[in-house]
Image: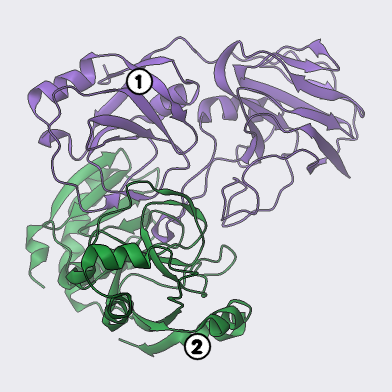
Amino acid sequence: MTIYKKLTYKRLDHKVFLVEWPPSIDENTLEEILALQKILYQNFSQEIRETVPGYHSLAVFLKDKVSYSEILPRIQESIPDADQVKITTDHWELPVCYDKEFGPDLESASKHTGISEQELVCLHQQGTYLVHFIGFLPGFPYLGGMDSRLSMPRKKNPRISVPAGAVGIAGNQTGIYPQNSPGGWNIIGSCPVPLFHPNQCPPCLLKPGDRVHFKAITQEEYRYLRESPAAWDTFKRSNGG
Amino acid sequence: MVGEIKVRKPGLYTTVQDMGRFGFRAYGVPVSGVMDTTSARMAQALVGNTEEEALLEITLRGPELYFGCTTLIAMTGANLSPQIDGKPVEMYQPYAITPGQVLSFGKPINGCRTYLAVKGGFQVEKVMDSFSWYQPVTPQSKLEKGDVIDVIETTYPHKPSHARVAPADFFQIQVEVFPGPEYDQLSKPVQQELISRHFHISNQAGRMGYRLKETLEHYQPQKDLLTSVVLPGTVQLTSGGGLIVLMRDCQTTGGYPRVLQLTKPAIDILAQKKPGDRVRFCWPG
């Protein structure tokens, strides 16, 4: 871990500042962000209200009584500790039904990429996706690692409502809509496992650093899984460590 | 004793709010909470509540509420012509309600959002440490016709109160800002334009954010940012040169340059602006 030396600090507000890594979407940056996040929660739990990761940043929210200029040097001193931190992550195999009924944009996606619908679905399943952070909507995972052959622009006319569970592609990213919302992603399938539960702790199925695989299922399996909350935990494949 | 308030008409956009939902941004959960914290705090204080209680945020066209019990209420913020049993009532002072009375609203006179506090707070479910309504965190996003909300019945008679506070200043068009993290990346003419001109609030203005009507003439789009945190009060510059001021229900992360950040009092001022109103960004002076 050497990028730690290149950190910059920017203020967002009186009580909020950003720790920024050089702009890049990569695994090392993610590891460093998560390690620093853990150190901050360990060493400054009385002073920090919450932290929010982005692709190459960690936003730090200070409690009201804490001053930025006072805490910053102490945070910088503790950064070397982050080198020793071990982050626990999980590996998921999430079921996705890629049938036409759930993937209204499969046909246009196939036309755009020049890849047959079947092969497109195959490529999408072959990827190992890294959860960089959760944002945009409650429980929405920003996933990295999509095959560049699957890249396609957002839809010109966003849908007024994309259903919860919809699996989509926009630009170089793939993602799952955790709830009904307007959206411009190209929808190629649907995942029956809910990603967000307001009454559970933690409320999100996935967390930054987790890895996700997609596995095709039939419509029958999809309907069964939707109604079977007991089965949802079984999609965790391993503790990646 | 628990009493009830029945919703006869929901109004344009009436929500239950508190000071916000903190500690869950890393799960993509917006902060929510009252848009105009200053007015909301005053309403709570007038009925003797702490600021943690739930109150109603009423937008432009108010609801019609039937009170089934004795309670004490206060309204602050926008003047939407409140009436009790059809008679106009004063805002910014506590008002004793007897069972069977009806609170309704008329024409918007000034501002955009009224805060209605009841003694003891509206009794709604707390989800993720907050009463603030935001779907899908809470089951409901706004008040609907026929809703019933519990309140705590006050059994003692309320003496007339002389407590009053000064109303919000709805004529203030200056909103104080600090440079955002990407402000320095803007060219000098764009920086100047941001601070020197007036902007109007467009029709796309709500609890998530306010889109401004004007676009920046001199702005040359840069490449998108890698997604990073945004806050209520963050001013985003879209690729077309448009500006969006994010508000309390805004998403937790975004990809547009964050060019300005409103101060907390500035967010309160903007929360009382409605489509067509004018604002001007200024440095704290």
What is the quadrant of the C terminus of chain B in the image? top left
Name which residue lies at 31% across and 87% down.
A240
Q: Is residue B7 above or below residue A180?
A: above
Kindly identify the amino acid type of the residue bearing the numbered disc 2.
Answer: Thr
Left or right of B46, for residue A26: left
**Front-lying residue, B142 or B75:** B142
Distance from disc 2 to disc 1, alpha carbons, whole Å, reads 52 Å
Name which residue lies at 39% across and 48% down.
A158
The extreme bottom residue here reads A238
Percent across and percent down for residue A29 are 17, 67
- Kindly identify which residue carries mark 1: B175
Q: How is the image coloured?
A: by chain
Q: Is residue B253 visible?
A: yes
Q: Nearer the viewer, mark 2 or mark 1?
A: 2
Percent across and percent down for residue A73 are 18, 52
Q: Is residue A151 visible?
A: no
Name which residue lies at 58% across and 29% down.
B41
Q: Which chain is green?
A: A
**Secondary structure under badge 2?**
helix
Kindly identify the amino acid type of the residue bearing the numbered disc 1.
Answer: Val
Percent across and percent down for residue A76 are 17, 58
**Secondary structure under badge 1?**
strand
- Kindly identify which residue carries mark 2: A234
Chain B as rendered: colour: purple
**Front-lying residue, A78 or A1:** A1
